[in-house]
Amino acid sequence: MNKHAYLIIAHNNWEQLHFLIDVLDDPRNDFFILIDSKASDFNQARFLSERKYKNLYFVEPINIIWGDYTQIVAEFSLLKAATSSYMYSYYHLISGSDMPLKSQDYIHNFFIKNDGYEFVDFDSFDDISLASARTRYYYFLQKQTGRKRISVTKILQKTLILIQQLIHINRSKSIESFLGKGSNWFSITDNFARYIVNNENFINKYFTRTFCCDEVFIQTLLKKSPYKNNWYGFTNDTIQYQNLRYNDWNRGKPYTFRKDEFFSLTKSPYLFARKFSNDIISDDILQHFTQKTPSNH
């Protein structure tokens, strides 16, 4: 069977996570879920007891810190769990607040027609400048700093970076030609997923103590890999987000879509969108994915 693995990172809004799995549920899909360990209100036993599906697996929770290496660890853990379970045709990394925009038949047929392509987002495939700024220095205090705008640790971290600039530290110099940056969410083949998992030492060496490199390490590994020429952007250079996930950065960081915007988004060329408020939980949205006849919307 042509099976897909959905790798889901979730932090909150458990009813929305329930709904997302209901929408994506299909015999051709398995789910691997990682919950941020800071989410003290998540009851895994209850969640599993309420599910009618046997294709749902939980990965060990991780305390995910914004901008820190733990973001990479979370994605790597999901890939490692999924590749150890089965040889899936595609692996889709999404968050618990994402939504598919197309039916499962449409999505599976799309990936059959485009089999072998890697759907990884790049801000600019050949531009290494932003990725270099995030990897060349040691961000020793990112775990303590997180999203804080002003703090003693952030001031200290900036001071340490300044010192490294003055003495010309560049820890990523040897891989500069491979560096890339884009969205961390992806849809990738089994070959590339296993290539990532088999490069754990490379990831540890170049991406520990970096800054926001969940948006760099997949792009860099793709450019370094034998699968570089399979990047979807080489085939379709008109689509803005090559990972097929629509975001609205004009109205937010990114903007949170509401239910009344959903059906207009389904007319786009994208397969997924992020992110949604929990008012997306509704019978008519669920019916949109489960009905046998084409939607009238």
Image (spheres, rainbow, N blue to C red):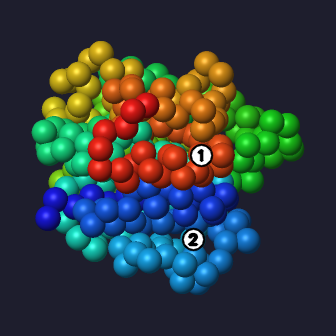
Residue 243 image point, x, y percent: 36, 35
Q: Amino acid at mark 1?
A: Ile
As shown in the figure, which amino acid type bears the numbered disc 2? Pro
- The quadrant in which the C terminus is found is top left
Residue 285 appears at what percent x and percent y?
Answer: 50, 46
The secondary structure type at the circle numbered 2 is strand
Query: Could one spot residue 73 in this view of the protein?
Result: no
Residue 58 as seen in the image, left or right of residue 161: left
- Report the quarter where the N terminus lies: bottom left
For the residues labelled 1 and 2, the Cα–Cα distance comes to 26 Å
**Nearer the observer, 71 or 207:** 71
Q: Does residue 238 appear in this view?
A: yes
Q: Is residue 4 left or right of residue 16?
A: left
Image quadrant in which you'd find residue 271 = top left
Do residues under tags 1 and 2 come within 8 Å of each other at their CB atoms? no
Residue at the spot 37% in from the left edge and 78% down from the top edge: 54
The x and y percentages for residue 93 are: 41, 51
51 in relation to 92, above or below: below
Q: Residue at (18%, 24%) from the top-left corner? A: 235
**In-front residue for pair 71/288:** 288
Which is more toward the observer, 3 or 137? 3
Instruction: Specify the farthest residue to the top.
Output: 238
Residue 32 place in picture, x, y as percent: 42, 66
Assess disc 1: are there few (<14), some (14-19) or many (≥20) residues with their C-alpha within 10 Å of its C-alpha.
many
Number of the label disc, if any, that sits on residue 72? none
- Reading the image, the residue beneath label 2 is 61
Q: Quadrant of residue 63?
A: bottom right
Mark seen at residue 280: 1
Q: Residue at x 73, y 71 (%)?
A: 41
Rendered position, 150 above or below 291: above
